[in-house]
Image (cartoon, coloured by chain):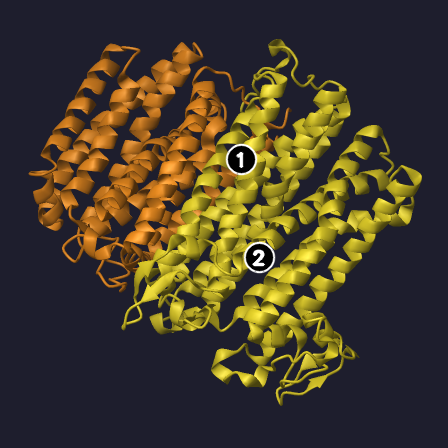
Chain colours: A orange, B yellow
Amino acid sequence: MSTAAAIVLFVGIVAYALFGGADFGAGFWDLVAGGTKGGARPRALIDHAIAPVWEANHVWLIFCFVVLWTCFPEAYASITLTLFVPLTLAAFGIVLRGAGFAFRKAVLRTSSRRNFGAAFAVSSVVVPYCFGAVVGGIASGRVPAGGEAGDPVSSWVNPTSILGGVLAVVVASYLAANYLVWDARRMSDHDMAAYFRRRALGAAVVAGVVAIAGIFVLRADARYVFDGLTSRALPLVIASIGAGAVALLFLWRGAPRGTRVLAAGAVASMVLAWGVAQWDYMLPESLTVSQAAAPSGTIGAVLVAVGIAAVLIGPGFVLLYTLDQRGALPEEGVDAGT
Amino acid sequence: VFDAALLAVDPVPWARAQMAFTLACHIILVPLGVSWAAMTLIANYRGLRRGDRDALELAQRWSKYMAVTFAVGAVSGTVLTFEFGLLWPRFMGRWGDAFGIPFAFEGIFFFMEAIFISIYIFGWRRLRPWAHFWSGVPIVLAGILGSASVVAANAWMNSPSGFTLNQAGEIVKVDPLAVIFNDSMPLQAAHMILAAYVVGGFLVASVYAVGMLRGRRDRYHRVGFIIAFTVAAIAMPIQMGVGDSLARWVYNNQPIKFAAIELVPTTSSDVPETILGRLNDDGTVSGGIPIPGLASWLSDPSTGTATVIKGLDSFPTGERPTIRQVNIVHLAWDAMVGLGTLLLLLSIWYGASWLFRRDMPKSKLFLRIAAASGVLAVITMEAGWVVTEVGRQPWIVYKHMKVEHAATGNTGVWITFLVVAALYVGVGTTTILVLRGMSRRFRAGREEEAVPYGPRDAVKAPEPAER
């Protein structure tokens, strides 16, 4: 039963990485798009791409928190006590990002657009870094069991956390660039498609380099997860590398189909590989999933809620995405019919 | 000398302050999220059924404002999710497996709301009119069920149930239904959902009342005012009834809180209803206007003034609110009941005018009070929330865990509180400015605006990113 809850938790984490990650990544490209004039076109495309569904994506984060604190309360207490700083920074970043994005569309003056845009873009980088650092702190066994606080600094300023943070930013940017190529093609904007294709290629190469460097970092700093990645989770690691390599090839040759799905597949299998690698620990080498689990009544209730969600929300989510992908949703929204 | 000890401050009061501050802000956005969709759909329905162009235009604009308030509300809700862990890790660690359950269900409704708000807002020109109308209905249902779920969690803190503890005080067995449908949940949830409709209705109506006072007495403003105000005016009397039942529930189940509400230092019968006034450190009550016997009579009309109300001194000092907290609870209670009564009278005035004159009241005085009703309703709701939360002190889980044992040990909370406060003031101010800017632009561009459900080419080209 606790295994089922852990799987549900990981489905949430993967979904947040894919959907939220793409949103954060789009913010990264917004940040590096250049000056007001030069960056206008990529920024317009980014706005267009995120607008219809952007509020929906933090729902995955809330989902992960709820499953964590309900099904694994002891682990949740340990994590929030130990990793207080990066989690607080992430929360601040989310406020700034959401407000910045919404208000950038709703205000008219260039200078205020620039300020809100900057808040949106900078926090789009800070938040995924913090989440990556949190994952690094957990994976390297720096969060103690028993609802106790670990070291407030070294738990998130350490080799594995830095690796996690950098990887999260790079991977989010890679995902977003892939999605944006697709969006640009759909709008028959060939300049922008080429613009983001170049960036997707660049991000893919950087992600590859960081991942290779990561092997050595994990071997030295997070041995349990490293051992897991090279044994239990090896098929997933290979799948991730394979999907990433094929996506790179497709991108290189400018193949219109499949890159987006392959890129998402590469990221999803990477996140899953982390989960399988630290199995069956919730907090590596101090708290296992079954030790951390809440009573069966609680987990049953959460699973029922997830089942209802799949039945009720699944169709709605599919409808929203279909409408969005068909271009049936014009960019109105908070744009307030200017 | 700037050393670490200087930065290390007792986190409990700061954690409390931060939670109170962020919740107090969030609770203002909640009514809009819960009830605005219903008002929008009423306008939408009217627009479609009767070909009322003003109503349709209102529905379209309201849905765009909704997008802004929902987005800000979603972000502030995300912050609260973080705070449960960051500020109250010991509470979540020990009680998460029970307290967390309602949130799993709230998650469903929040998801649903986010998805259908997106579909509804972006579907204005892309879906067939009635299909579009129906895409808004799930938002209304999700708002109601979502707030019922969140309030279930809060109610559980007031009347914890549905769990079995072992010798060490750890939860070993959980009955999810008993957690969600705890004793306090039905009335508390009803009270909050109605509050959402009361506050949302008065808030929206007050904007149009201001417009009318400034001379914009066209049909558009009238329809906007009438839809919103009618929703609030219908919810108001029901709310008074539910509030009365809830107070009696508190009398029967949370005598400590009730003693604070009614300012009762020692157990007695024939307790007066003291309006204002304060409890002194020596346990006496001074000031205020006592109405003889009324508190006793209201607590149980069947026994009248003979009804005995337990006093604060029947509980050990460590298990009841402090003198200062008692005074806060009592004052908040007076504010809630007083302003609630005022809003009820305003609703009756409005209802009577429709009944006898077949029209809304036209007088300046009515419009002036109506223009203030939004802010007054927000204050009323905040006061009610203060009564529930401060009245529960010192418990975070009633009779099971005290707030001071629930907080984080992290001594830097005062810094996060200051940052959060600054962020929220900034975001709040900007939200208001943005909403006003939107309204100004709506007014300026009223004639040229595309017809709702118009043909596709009526959509204007996307804005360039700069101007």
**Placement of B304 over or under B70, stated as above or below:** below
Q: Position of residue B130 (x, y in %)?
A: 62, 20
Q: Identify the subunit bearing mark 2.
A: B
The picture quadrant where one finds residue A81 is: bottom left
Q: Amino acid at mark 2?
A: Gln
Percent across and percent down for residue B137 are 58, 31
Name the residue nearer the viewer: A182 or A269: A269
Left or right: where does residue A47 sit relative to residue B164?
right
Q: Residue at x 51, y 72 (%)?
A: B393
**Where, by quadrant of the figure, is residue A76 drawn?**
bottom left
Answer whether residue A251 is visible to the viewer in this image. yes
Task: Decide: is B143 above or below B412.
Answer: above
Can residue A35 be seen in this snapshot? no
Q: Which residue is mark 2?
A: B188
Give the percent coordinates (x, y) of residue A239: 15, 27
In this picture, residue A317 sits left or right of residue A69: right
Type of the residue with mark 1: Ala
Tell me what residue is drawn at x 47 percent, y 63 percent: B157
Provide the secondary structure element on which disc 1 rests: helix
* Residue under numbered circle 1: A102
**Spatial distance from mark 1 to mark 2, Cα to Cα?**
33 Å
Q: Quadrant of the N terminus of chain B?
A: bottom left
